[in-house]
Every structure is written in structure tokens, then in C-alpha cells.
Amino acid sequence: MDLRFVRDLTEKPGPFATAYLDASHDTEDAAHAGGLRWAGARGELAEQGADEATLAALEAAATRDDPPVGRAGRVLVAAGGQVLLDRLVPEPPASARVRWGSVPDLVPLLVDQGEPVTAVVARIDDTGGEILLARPGSDPEPVGGKVDADPAGPVHKVRGGGWHHLKMQHRVEETWRRNTAAVAERIDTLVSETAAGVVVIAGETQSRSRLRGALGERSSGIAVEVEHSTAAGSDELEEAVEAAVRDVVDERRHAALEQLDQALGRPDGLAVHGVEPVLAALRATAVETLFLDGGVARAGRVWVGEAPTAVATREDELRAMGAEPVQQLDVDDALLRAAAASDAAFVPLGGGRSGFVGRPVDDGVAAVLRFPLPPGA
């Protein structure tokens, strides 16, 4: 999971208010129930010290008039009177959770919910295609109008023989090729601009095949096909996109857990586990992927310096490295903040709703490294 959004959040000045809310809208009194839930969360945040401007910003987001349909959760982070993160998630929290603190409370979001993946969706036919974009937590939405390179060109072959008919068939195929190339070019651009994790191609079999062959290497490598043409906004299309995103997330997590399992089984030092070894790796900015087990409680606090990667369980240890202790954070918050600052990725090791459980590791925390640490680091 990409942690850039965590880094962007934690680089902003705090303190931060974080709220995990039930945003379900599946009963007649859903709006009233949601208002009561928010009132309770607001009161708790106020008791913890949240300022009025930040509470007002959260309230505007939590009670807005475009609720999701069915069951859903909402994760909100705000500071200084501004909402910094507003994310809908598929499942509501088991119970409301709020926190006012020096860093956002993001570990439950990362452990319990699926990795946010943007999908580019193409509905392709002989005349061109319609392209949609499905951002995390949102249904597919059209991006511009219909894409075609030659709207006046012939798109239907005709029966018959002879030179005239052969020439017409070649013109039709050339129109198909140009239209497909125009759609492929637009998809490649969107994939690059949005860092999409999957391209979903819907349409007739031959049209899908032509488009996939015209895509660039990056887009083609993340493309999946939907067997039947589906209309924009239809449940079938939305379900196909959701399934494609789930498959991408599952595949990434399985691959990461397999990499961890193999690395821990080798003597080359490219994986460590336990809080202290992982903290040492984070100080050296050696962590490629951080793994946390949401089912393991990691007690204690970690001292952090001005730099997020200046982390240690003792003040004197931090000072010995030339970093002045600034504050103490919960273990998970310190690990996540340091990992995000060093461009590491994140994968839930187990616990939460992910259903992915790797090999047991000390303290429920492990890391795959970019390079082995020197002895005694």
C-alpha cells in the first residue's frame, strides 16, 4: 500500500482530529441515527481538547447531504479548521473511534480497509470508446466524451466480393485501428496521471482484444477484461470494477507476504521482525515494506525526533544518534510515520478485516529491507 497520503498528512501542522464513523444509509432513520452518532463523536473529541474550528469542519463533512447508499464507513482527519482526509470505506467501524492527538490515527484505516486503488474503465466498440475513472470510494464517472479518431469513417463491413468490397473492408479495419489507438492513448495518459492500479476493459471480444493490444506496456500489464458490454452507471459495471480492484489488492498482498516469508527464511538480512529491529531499520531508511499485524497489541511508547525517522524506545538512545527527542508516540503511530517519511510501502500482516495472515513475527511487526543493516545497527 502506498503511504504517500500518510506522509502528506503527517507533514502538516497538528494537532489532528481523527474520526471513524458509521456512515451507513440503509434504514429509514439513517440520517437521524447518523446525526446522533456524530454528536457523540463530537462531544468526545471536544473533551479531548479539539478546537471549535476543527470540530465545525468535521461536522460539515460528517453530516453533508450526499450519504452513501447501504452500509459504509467514513474516516475523517482534520486540523486547523480544515478537513485533510475524507474517505468512504466499504464497512463501518465496529464502534465509533475518535482521537485528538499530535499525529492522525491512521493504523485502523490501513489495517481494516482495502488498499485504495484507482481504476480506469473503458467501454470499447468499433466506433471508439467511452472512458471512465473510478477513484477510491467512488463509482466510475465518465472522463470527457466519446473517444474516436475518425467519427466519419466506416465501421461496418459489407458482404460481397471483388476489389471494391476488399478496399471497403480495409477502410473499415483502418477506422477500427485508428479509433482503438485513440482510446488506448487516452487510457495510457490517464493511467500515468492517476497512478491507476487497474484498467477494466468492457465490450465485445474482438474490440477488447484490439484495445489491449494497442495499450502501452504499463496499461496492458494491469488490464483486465469484462466479458459483456455494460452501461456506464450500471450495477454490473460497478461490480466488475469492484471485483477487479479486489483482485489487484489481493494479488499485491499475497505477493508481499510471500516476499516477506522468503526473506525471513534467508540469511542475507533483507528482512527483520520485532519492534526494536524494525525501528533500527527505519532509522537507517532501509525499510522497503512495513508489515503490521492488527491483531497484536504493541504496548509502550516510542521517542521521536524532529525527523520522522529519528525513532527509538529510549531518550538516551535517540540523543546518542544526534537527535533531540521531541515527543512520544504510540508504537504503531511512530512506525507508520517513519515508514511513510522514508517512502516505504505498507501491508497488513493479519488481524483487522483483511483476512491475510503471514508467518508469526515478534511483536506482530516486520519489514522487508532495501539493503541489509550492518551488525549492531
Image (cartoon, grey):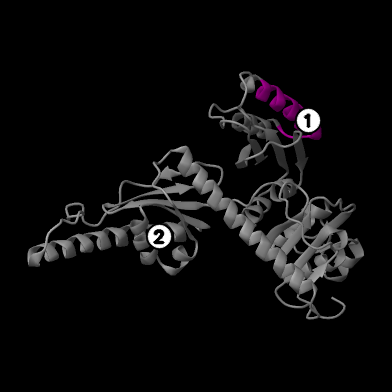
Instruction: Name the front one of labels 1 and 2.
Output: 2
- The N terminus sits in image quarter: bottom right
Residue 211: in magenta span: no
In the image, the segment drawn in magenta is: 33-51
Q: Is residue 44 magenta?
A: yes
Q: Residue at x 79, y 60 (%)?
A: 305
In the image, 224 versus 185, the foreground residue is 224
Q: Between 34 and 84, which is closer to the camera in this rendering? A: 34
| Label 1: which secondary element | helix
Identified at 11% across, 63% down, the residue is 161
Residue assigned mark 1: 44
The residue singled out by tag 2 in the image is 189
Q: Secondary structure at mark 2?
A: helix
Label 1 Cα crowd, 10 Å radius (few <14 / some 14-19 / many 20+): some
Query: In the depicted view, which residue is nearer to us: 275 or 115?
Result: 115
Residue 73: x %, y % from top left: 65, 36
Judged left or right of residue 364, residue 121 is: left
Where 286 sits versus 29, above or below?
below
* Residue type of the residue flagged with mark 1: Glu
Q: Does residue 345 sit above or below 121 in this rendering?
A: below
